Image (cartoon, helix red, strand yellow):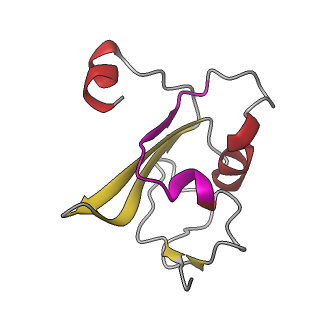
């Protein structure tokens, strides 16, 4: 299928590095494609052992983040994108976040 993603916006509190906004990727260019092209929410808290991120190693490597939350965006049950939040430090979900999101 003819599928691609486009990074619509990015933000870094330190305003360092290159912006990814406007970049477009196809599945063969974007290793973590299968990690975020899903209807399921993904929460990687960053508490995994260093270097032991398993099937999500490409996602951590591509974005250079420790913790990652990928939330599918739907319109009338049709996927239209993914909201990806990340941090350089671990972000374990609180009890409330577990109830609401997981």
Q: Residue 12 vs residue 64: left or right?
A: left
Residue farthest left in this picture: 76
Q: Residue 29 vs residue 47: left or right?
A: right
Asked if 16 appears above or below 24 in the picture, the reply is: above
Residue drawn at x 56%, y 78% as measured from the top left: 23
Could you say which quadrant of the image residue 81 lies in? Answer: bottom left
Q: Residue 44 vs residue 62: left or right?
A: left
Name the image quarter holding the N terminus: bottom right
The front one of 15 and 55 is 55
Could you say which quadrant of the image residue 97 lies in? Answer: top left
Residue farthest top in this picture: 95
Residue drawn at x 55%, y 68% as measured from the top left: 19
Magenta span contains residue 45: yes
Name the image quarter holding the C terminus: top left
Magenta span contains residue 39: yes
Region of the chain picked out in magenta, as a range: 34-46
Residue drawn at x 65%, y 49% as measured from the top left: 59
The front one of 53 and 79 is 79
The front one of 61 and 17 is 61
Could you say which quadrant of the image residue 41 lies in? Answer: top left
Image coordinates of residue 95 in percent, x first then y, are 32, 13
Asked if 64 appears above or below 90 in the picture, the reply is: below
Image coordinates of residue 92 in percent, x first then y, are 48, 21
Residue farthest right in this picture: 51
Q: Residue 52 vs residue 38: left or right?
A: right
């Amino acid at each position: 299928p003819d599928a691609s993603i486009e990074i619509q916006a990015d933000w870094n509190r330190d305003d360092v590095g290159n912006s990814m906004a406007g970049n477009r990727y196809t599945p063969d260019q974007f290793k973590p494609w299968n990690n975020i092209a899903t209807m399921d929410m993904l929460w990687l808290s960053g508490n995994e052992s260093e270097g032991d991120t398993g099937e999500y190693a490409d996602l951590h490597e591509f974005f250079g983040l420790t913790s990652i939350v990928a939330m599918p965006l739907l319109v009338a049950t049709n996927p239209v994108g993914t909201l990806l939040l990340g941090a350089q430090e671990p972000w374990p979900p609180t009890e409330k976040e577990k109830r609401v999101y997981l």
